[in-house]
Amino acid sequence: PLLLLLLAAAVVVSVSSAADAKSAPAPAPATVDIIGILHKAGQYAFFIRLLNQTQIANQIDNQAETSADGMTVFAATDDAFRNLPAGTLNNLSFQRQIQLLQYHICPKFYTLDELQTVSNPVRTEASGQDGQVFGLNFSADANQVNLSTGVVQVSINNAVEDNFPLAVFEVDKVLLPLEF
Ligand SMILES: *[C@@H]1O[C@H](CO)[C@@H](O)[C@H](O)[C@H]1NC(C)=O
Ligand SMILES: *[C@@H]1O[C@H](CO)[C@@H](O)[C@H](O)[C@H]1NC(C)=O
Ligand SMILES: *[C@@H]1O[C@H](CO)[C@@H](O)[C@H](O)[C@H]1NC(C)=O
Ligand SMILES: *[C@@H]1O[C@H](CO)[C@@H](O)[C@H](O)[C@H]1NC(C)=O
């Protein structure tokens, strides 16, 4: 019985290696799950809900998985949303809400070190009707990296995720663009 077992195992091995040889041995694409990452980190219920409602979560996952440049997301905490003046979000049209979320996303992977020396303005996924891309400005000293939208300034300290293709940094303010 042992020999039979070994034979059976050998057959399974050779069949599966033949199958492997047929399908091209492409490197397995990274699987990105922005909602899973934020959910695990906690304190992003609001941001998650907006990303999900607008389908932007899927776009982030797909783009991070397929783009050679990767992605960076500045994730606004629940406190950040609570600290917005009452009515700010509700006053935004659905289109504006999408722009607001896109303004929290850069179509390139940045580490915290790279943000210290990046040249301004940094492109985001948000743009106006004229096609003008909304930018973010970064400044850094030995101690910290600051992000400015022209309206809001936040310090970037905590990387929630920093493995290519996706970087996620915590921001404790919602990044309202100058353009609004
Ligand atoms: C995303 O939205 C769908 C329906 O629009 C809902 O079923 C799902 O639970 C939501 N997921 C999260 C993580 O909020
Ligand atoms: C929301 O819109 C109302 C009516 O236009 C306005 O009075 C209010 O100031 C707005 N609130 C914010 C936070 O923009
Ligand atoms: C970053 O922001 C903090 C707090 O607003 C400020 O004290 C610091 O000087 C800023 N640093 C840079 C490099 O902009
Ligand atoms: C970024 O800095 C440039 C040059 O200082 C300035 O013209 C632009 O308005 C700034 N943009 C933001 C979003 O702060």
Image: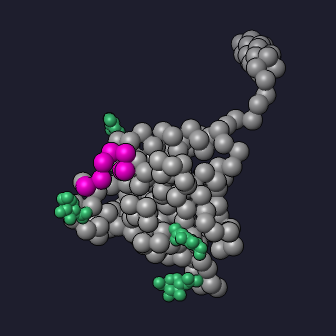
Q: How many marks?
A: 0
Q: In the visual, does 24 lie left or right of 157? A: right
- Residue drawn at (54%, 76%) of the image: 146
Q: Is residue 101 left or right of residue 87?
A: right
Is residue 176 visible in the rendered image? The answer is yes
Where in the figure is residue 171, as x and y percent of width and height? 45, 67
Instruction: Pick out the residue farthest to the front.
Output: 130
Residue 53 spot, x, y in % from top left: 35, 41
Give the residue displayed 69% in from the left and 73% down from the top.
117
Q: Left or right of 111: which side holds 175?
A: left
Residue 2 visible in the current orientation: no
Q: Residue at x 65, y 49 (%)?
A: 70
x and y percent of residue 64 in the render? 60, 44
Magenta range: 91-97
In the rendered image, the vertical position of residue 98 relative to residue 85, given as above or below: above
Question: Is 18 placed above or below 143 here?
Answer: above
Q: Where does residue 140 sit, x and y in percent of width and height?
A: 61, 79
- 85 with respect to 127 (left or right): left
Residue 79 within the segment the image draws in magenta: no
Q: Residue at x 33, y 55 (%)?
A: 46
Residue 93 falls within the magenta-colored stretch: yes
- In what quadrant of the picture does the N terminus appear? top right
- Quarter occupied by the C terminus: bottom left
Specify the quadrant of the image occupied by residue 55.
top left
